[in-house]
Amino acid sequence: MRRVYLDNNATTRMDPRVLEAMSPHFLQDFGNASSIHEFGQQAREAVETARQAVADLIGCLPKEIVFTSGGTESDNTAIRGIAAGHSGKGRHLITTTIEHPAVLRTMERLEEEGFQVTYLPVDRQGLIRLDDLRAAVREDTILISVMHANNETGAIQDLRAVGRLARKKGILFHSDAVQSAGKIPVDVNDLGVDLLTLSAHKIHGPKGVGALYIRHGVEMKSLLLGGSHERGRRGGTENVPGIVGLGKAAALARKGLADFDLRVRSLRDRLETGLLERIPQARINGSTLRRMPHTTNLSFRGVEGEALLISLDLQGIAVSTGAACSSGSLEPSHVLKAMGFQNRRVESALRLSLSRMTIEEEIATALDVLPSTVQRMRELSPLYRESRNRVQREGQRAHS
Amino acid sequence: MYSEKARELIRELPNRGSLAGATHTARAENPACGDITHLYLKLNQDVVVDSRFETYGCPAAIAASAAVTQMCRNLRSGECREITAESILDYLGGLPSHKLHAVDLAVDVLRKALRSNEP
Amino acid sequence: MRIGKTIYLDHQATTPVDRRVLAKMHPYFIDSFGNPHSSDHSLGWEAARAIEEAAACIGRFIGADYDELTFTSGATESNNLALLGLGRRAAWGERRRILVSAIEHKCVLAASRILTEQYGFTVEQLPVDPDGFVILPVLEEALDSDVLAVSIMAVNNEIGTIQDIKGISECVRSCGAIFHCDAAQTPLGIPVNSIARHTDILSLSAHKMYGPKGVGILFLTRGLENQIEPQIYGGGQQNGLRSGTVPVPLCVGMGEAAKMIFGPDAEGKRAMLRRRRDAFVEKLEELPWPTIVNGPKAEARHPGNANICFSGFSAHDILHMLQPHLSASTGSACTSGIPETSHVLNAIGLEWNKAESSVRFSLGFGTSDEDVEDAVELIDGVLEKLSKVDIADRT
């Protein structure tokens, strides 16, 4: 059975070229990048080459890139680092209700420590309103953190507008770009962000490595304390193979941006249109205008998402109901709830996310299997029967 | 992670749908997670001769309800009352620890159904 | 062991990844690449199971259950999590003092500085004797009912001192303090299970035991999980103690490395390592150059560690001249980017100029007799050259 993998927002398959680039750093060029000898220096060089590649991907200087263990650590470092470093100026932060838990939980923790946080709502499209942001800004606001693309709906926030406002008000601006960088153009100067979070394993790089862009001159405290690694911003022996892998993944992603927008988008559109045609009472969740080219989030009325998901998995199709990050139990999506959808619609949501490695056969298989599976689940669903009966009754009433 | 038996039930969805001519029916809902189960039983001389279910809910709720429809076949109503959360779990070969409550819904709907036709 | 033509004697900075370890990691990069927290599909389950197996594997060797282990990005993060985690959770508690040895790794010292500056703890650095041993009576004297935690490394990274962890542990536990042990340097040095049961919290790193960089663990004795404040918040992975997608291939690599390094033949490898290290030191002492061994006698010393003071020579010059034929280091790798005097050598009372003349050689399981002989020859040659330069300078 060939597996169909449509859960690329959770994690991606590593590109063989990335592994190839990493391989020598496990066995031969394995030095500690902080050692002064030959081995150390080779490792150092490899790390700096990777730093350049990551910088090129987002249009910054290499020295503005700090390597971390992944997106979660980057988010924590950015938010806590700014909060701790700027609490003299103020103790108010602004974020959104649809952020990744790495941002939300860190913000909540800061609230316990006496900071104040405003959580901006989103509309049915999953987008924040600039007016809300304007109204939320205070004298003592020290940081605005707004994610670029949402992991569940793919909705893309207007960071440029947020950046302009932040700059005007003299507030630092962080964005979690884990789901966008490497898939759509991200330029830190164009967007006006001061801090930006990246992760390798969402763009066919290795797990266990990410990066944080910190604009030159931005003062902050470190999260991980150790030696003088990463210009004193992040302690711990550099994960050289991981960093090399991130560098390679960034370089490959940058080269593939145009293809991603064209080919992946067309596959996603074919999948989405096909499903909407084949499955009655299916609806798209979130903006279709400001949206990543590789994500679609659909609700199928009367079908519980997790059950659908397991059923699909048993047929070799991997998808998701939303955020993967939780301790085994699936909570209803906080993102779809924040968009104002009823519980039943939230529960019946399915996220399908593609990557540049997705092939046409996978889309064809998904289009083949999903409609029949939804149909079978609906035969089982008392909710669907009730809603169908209701529709029929209303239809009869309209005719009579 | 689901057991082989649970996966089989989720894949096959045996005894799904409503049952015309059911003698005993019940609906149960888990208010905490919103899962809903309908059970349809057809008893002939106090023996379950047919059983169907409809479930809206997580995979565990579906597996547990499907299990009940299989377990109660050809049993007398008194024997059906002896089906417990534990025996369903045994039948399923276990459930993920955070899904254990799903069998309570299945037991609940079975007990209700058996009572549904009492005078 | 050689890489190309270079003899590598810096195993305490980092070890290469063992081929078997890499082979075991390989499938998790490309084929079983699922997100272990995707509880919804089998790719995710496969990944989650691989992590559990890796944890169980490491746990077996340190006498821990798999759920007492938390994967981190390495020993630095583990040490941060242990100390800052304990301190932040107990920020308003009765116990206001934290004791660390003066020769701890930089990251322990840095974390304890934060505990002083931001959380008002009194962090005391325990002195060590000239061999780097924590002085038990001094520790006993410092311990009191107001001590929250004591952090002492099992094996020193620069001079290889193996502490009496059992003795230290008895003292610490008798006053109700929590004992954290940075065990990053133990795997090549001593059987880690011999110390793990004497500790409450223990840090390990994979890349110092032939595993991959970017992963380590924190062993937290059951019952202590509520006394640690997480440092990284997010999706609530690993019981909320450390959020973030767990890097499956790296964890699998650490599990496999544990199997090898804690396995039945490890004692034999350590004995071999000790023999070669001793031969290395003996041969260096036979050379016509002044050599002093810094740190403890062989028995209580990491079997691969040799910290040698070449009086009258600059360690930096020696290391520089040895390139690219031999890799060694001055003290801990983490600080060698910026030359500064080793705080460890300082703490054992070495004068400044002696410290500046000291080189740390650390042999590994792959170091051969031939490597030892060739290394000594190379060092001899370099010292010979440097002595001539010195004389030329002087005249």
Image (cartoon, helix red, strand yellow):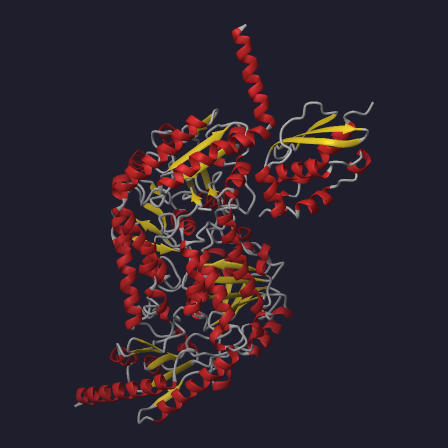
Q: Is residue A391 left or right of residue C388?
A: right
Quadrant of the frame with the C terminus of chain C: bottom left
Q: Is residue A343 visible?
A: no
Residue at 25 percent of width and 52 percent of height: A61
Q: Residue furthest top?
A: A400
Q: Vertical placement of A5 versus C277: above or below?
A: above
How many discs appear?
0
Q: Vertical placement of A315 versus A36: above or below?
A: above
Measured from the top left, where is residue A14 in percent x and y? 37, 52
Residue at 64 percent of width and 70 percent of height: C174
**Depth order, front residue of B24/A125:** B24
Quadrant of the frame with the N terminus of chain C: bottom left
Q: Is residue B60 visible?
A: yes
Q: Quadrant of residue C311?
A: bottom left
Q: Quadrant of residue C22?
A: bottom left
**Depth order, front residue of A282/C228:** A282
Measured from the top left, where is residue C156 in percent x and y? 46, 75
Q: Is residue B41 left or right of residue A138?
A: right
